[in-house]
Every structure is written in C-alpha cells, then in structure tokens.
Image: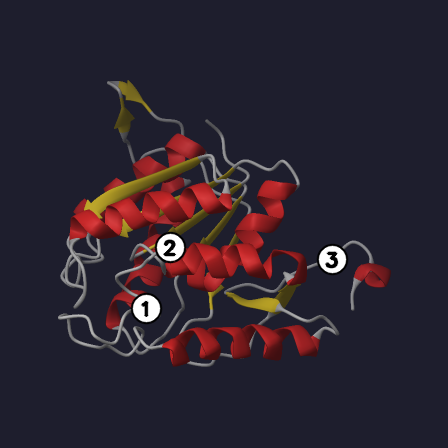
Amino acid sequence: MKLDLMVITVHPDDAELGAGGVIAKYVSEGKQVGIVDLTRGELGTRGTAETRASEAEAAAKILGVAIRENLELKDGFFENNEASQRVVIQCIRKYQPELIITNALDDRHPDHGRASKLVNDSLFLAGLRRVETESNGELQEAFRPRLHLQLIQDKYIQPDIIIDITPFWEIKKQSILAYTTQFNTDPDSDEPQTYISTPDFILYTEGRAREFGRSIQATYGEGFTSRKLLGVDDLFSLR
C-alpha cells in the first residue's frame, strides 16, 4: 500500500499528541494515512507494552488510519546506527509516503530527538539505490519522500508551519485519551502518577493547540518544523 502521509514516531501516542489533528484531517479528505511506531514504549512508567499496543490500536481506529505498524526497536536504547536505519529504510520503501512527519528535532525526552535524527538519516539513505533492502524476498526500489516535517512536542520550538485542525480537535483528543493507562488517569490507581497522567497535561495539550490556532486565526492548530525552506504556489492561499 502506498501512503500519502506517514507519521513515524518513537512511542505509541507521540503521533496522536503531535499530529492527531492533521492525521484526522487528511483521513477525512480520503488520503491514505499511516502511523508507524518505532518502539513499543515498553519503558513507560504506567501500563505495559501489551496495554500500549491495545491502546494504539484503539487510537488508530478513532483516527481512521489505513495502517499502523510497530518496528519494535528497543525503547530508550535504540541507536541511530546501520541496523536501525535499515529497519526504517525498509519501512519507508514499503509504503512510499509522499510526506513524513516524525518526532521533534530536540525535546525533553531524549528518545524524541534521537528518533528524529534516525528517521532523517534513513530518509536520505532510502533514496540511494546502492543501499539495498528486501521485502518478502524481493529487492526494494529506492524511494525518498518529497517532504519531511517534525512535530513540536514538550519543548516549545517556533513552528515553521501551522495547520488548522479546528474541525478535528475532538477526534485528536479522543485518540489521545484512548491511551487510558497514560493520560488523565484515576488518581486512586496503584500505579505512580507521572508528568502526563494528570488532567493538567490534557489541558496543557489543548492550550498549545489553541496557541498555535490563534497564530493563524483559528481555534486549534498543530505546528511543525522543517529542516528545509518551504515553498508555496499561491501567496493568496496563505493566512
């Protein structure tokens, strides 16, 4: 299956938190959208890898994505090396997305920036025909997406582009809350409270979306960064 948009991020829930609105928007327009998680999030303080997998499946159904796949790299300890790059290259060539969104360039969680670098390096290598990978015993064709953007996550980074997600905010919110072990959880739970498990974190997430939305005269927005300058065909389409 060829994808129009692939969101490839390191932990199950990163895609929903950073790009859930954009995912829902393009699904609604009939685009082929997929989510690829690099790890199972097995080092998370709350829940287990198994519960995260179940929650990720529920979130994918809410968003309506065409595929969700997990590459099962080692949470917390994956490296940006040849072995990991070949796994990511194989996935990129398998789905041949026009656009890729991945983790923030720099963030509080060290996995985020490392994953962003891993995907960026893999994207370049995926376009080199002499880097050979196989799928189902057949040699894959070289492929490189035409555009690569990064999320803005915990650490505030000035966005290069903001997308209006106002009609899709509730879908995004419900996809986040599908991770019942992680967000807005029962304060009487036996598991420890974390930075993201209190109701305040959802309010913070909404506040960030409202801040980005206000910048483009919308109610809610999602911001992204780009490693390259972005071009447009029509100045009159800009806000």
Q: Are marks 3 and 2 in contact (CB under 8 Å)?
A: no
Question: Which residue corresponds to mark 1?
Answer: 113
In the rendered image, residue 62, in percent from the top left (x then y), is placed at 47, 46
Can residue 61 be seen at all in this image of the molecule? yes
Q: Secondary structure at mark 3?
A: loop
Query: Which numbered disc covers residue 232?
Result: 3
Q: Residue furthest top?
A: 137
Amino acid type, label 2? Ala
Instruction: Give the amino acid type for the residue marked by disc 3 in the picture.
Output: Val
Residue 198 point in image, percent of width and height: 33, 77
Splitting the image into 4 quarters, where does residue 47 fall?
bottom left
Q: Position of residue 172 (x, y in %)?
A: 51, 58
Q: Does 2 sit above or below residue 6?
A: above
Q: Position of residue 165 (x, y in %)?
A: 63, 61
| Gap in angstroms between the C-alphas marked 1 and 2 | 25 Å
* Local crowd size for mark 3, using a 10 Å CA cut-off: few (<14), some (14–19), many (≥20): few
Which is more foreground, mark 3 or mark 1?
1
Give me the residue at 40% from left, 60% from top: 177
Q: Earlier in the sequence, mark 3 or mark 1?
A: 1
Q: Is residue 78 left or right of residue 161?
A: left
Q: Amino acid at mark 1?
A: Gly
Tell me which numbered mark, 1 or 2, is placed earlier along the sequence: 1
- Residue at (25%, 43%) from the top-left corner? 71
Badge 2: residue crowd in 10 Å (few <14, some 14–19, many ≥20)? many
User: Relative to residue 163, is residue 99 depicted above or below?
Assistant: above
Q: Quadrant of residue 17?
A: bottom left
Rendered residue at 61%/76% (across/down): 210
Disc assigned to residue 178: 2
